[in-house]
Amino acid sequence: MPVLSMNNIKSITLLAFTIVLLNGCTTVRGTGDLGVVIERATGSVQVVDTTQRTSLKQVNGLGDLSHASIVYSRDARYAYVFGRDGGLTKVDILKGEISKRVIQGGNSIGGAISQDGKLVAVSNYTPGGVKVFDANTLELVDDIPAIYGKDNQQSKTVGLVDAPGQRFVFSLYDAGEIWLVDYSGAKAQITKYKDIGLQPYDGLITPDGRYYIAGLFGEDGLALLDLWHPEKGVKRILNDYGRGTQKMPVYKMPHLEGWAMTDDYAFFPAVGRNEVLVMDRRNWKQVKKISVHGQPVFVMARPDGRQVWVNYAFPDNDTVQVIDTDKLKIVKTLKPGKAVLHMEFTPRGEHVWISARDAGKVTIYDTDSFNALTSLPMAKPSGIFFTNRAHQIGL
């Protein structure tokens, strides 16, 4: 057997290292600057890179994504996609492929992941209720039908969020109730708050996880539950807010999950009005109305709280406006394209990605200069979800 010289050994080592690189080690990466964009027309998602501002891969086969949303695993590798067809799909965003998919209901509208990352909960219109799954295997862990009233009717569930203490909170649209489900013990404990108001259509949790707020479609006002003191029950705030007695046409219900929260104020969309309302977070009282371009859908704060970006319902949905949170006035109006559906800030807020469904593109803007940096073509894009959501309460 020939004796290898030192030069030969070095050559063989270099060749082996090159083969390893060519076989994919150069693709090893973190997930901190990745995200997912929903393509509702094709039942697919695009995995995107927010540093390079590019699309990395399309993942197909996710069903009806007409009202899809996403939560992430704690390690931000897996995206759990909630589809309108009742599909729950676990997507590996590093590999760009589906890991697991189940049909868990007939019409799901969103979901949440538990504080420890082990449970994924799905909110359903049909059948009304919440189902809870093992985040690893997607095996069913719990089924919570939203049964209410003397006749045991079943309600649509909305506004599902995760809360500190291994809890989920959601609202019952038909029943006018808020349910708090605690998974911190061996068995789930459910606390039901009844008569909170007519037709709660969505809900949010404040970024610190303390307050759950349900918007009411059937009457004026909001319902607030203090999760530090849940024994005090639900109280009404902002009783002159909403649709209630005014009966104005509502072209698209606002998404309360997109409310903007800064240190001092909460900025939120007025139902059926061309206004953004400003509330003092210390006492939950309104301090200002800001007239805007149309009926707001999302009212979202830049991560540093210095700006609030607003998009609008049809027929004014080609426009985005920026509110200066110090001056409490509009400082910029943009036209990203027809049917702007969603906005998402990069983790530190230097850029914002905006989807325009009918324009078939996502446009990336610099949030200081408001200049458009680039656009990515996509098939009817809607929701945009970056992986920093994995470490935020209620997202």
Image (cartoon, rainbow, N blue to C red):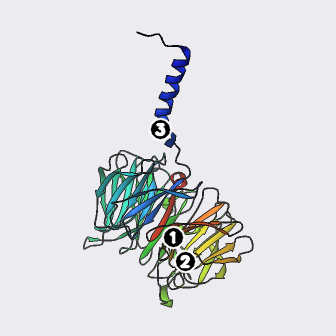
Element under disc 2:
loop
**Between marks 1 and 3 in the image, the one whose residue lies nearer the viewer:** 3
Residue at x 58% of width, y 75% of height: 336
Graded by Cα atoms within 10 Å as few (under 14), some (14 to 19) or many (20 or more), the crowding at tag 1 reads many
Q: Amino acid at mark 3?
A: Leu
In the displayed structure image, the side of residue 300 where residue 244 appears, left or right: left
Q: Amino acid at mark 1?
A: Lys
In the rendered image, residue 81, in percent from the top left (x then y), is placed at: 39, 59
Residue at x 53% of width, y 44% of height: 30
Q: Earlier in the sequence, mark 2 or mark 3?
A: 3
What residue did someone put label 2 on? 337
What residue did someone put label 1 on? 361
Name the quadrant containing residue 127: bottom left
Q: Earlier in the sequence, mark 1 or mark 3?
A: 3
Furthest residue toward front:
2
Q: Is residue 146 visible?
A: no
Name the quadrant containing residue 85: bottom left
Q: Mark 1 and mark 2: span between their CA atoms? A: 8 Å
Callout 2 touching callout 3 (CB < 8 Å): no
What residue did someone put label 3 on? 22
Callout 1 touching callout 2 (CB < 8 Å): yes
Furthest residue toward left:
151
Graded by Cα atoms within 10 Å as few (under 14), some (14 to 19) or many (20 or more), the crowding at tag 2 reads many
Q: Nearer the viewer, residue 10 or 278?
A: 10
How many numbered marks, from 0 up? 3
Picture layout, residue 328 above or below residue 303:
below
Picture layout, residue 94 above or below residue 363:
above
In the rendered image, residue 140, in percent from the top left (x then y), is placed at: 29, 52
Q: Quadrant of the N terminus?
A: top left
In the rendered image, residue 33, in percent from the top left (x then y), is placed at: 56, 52
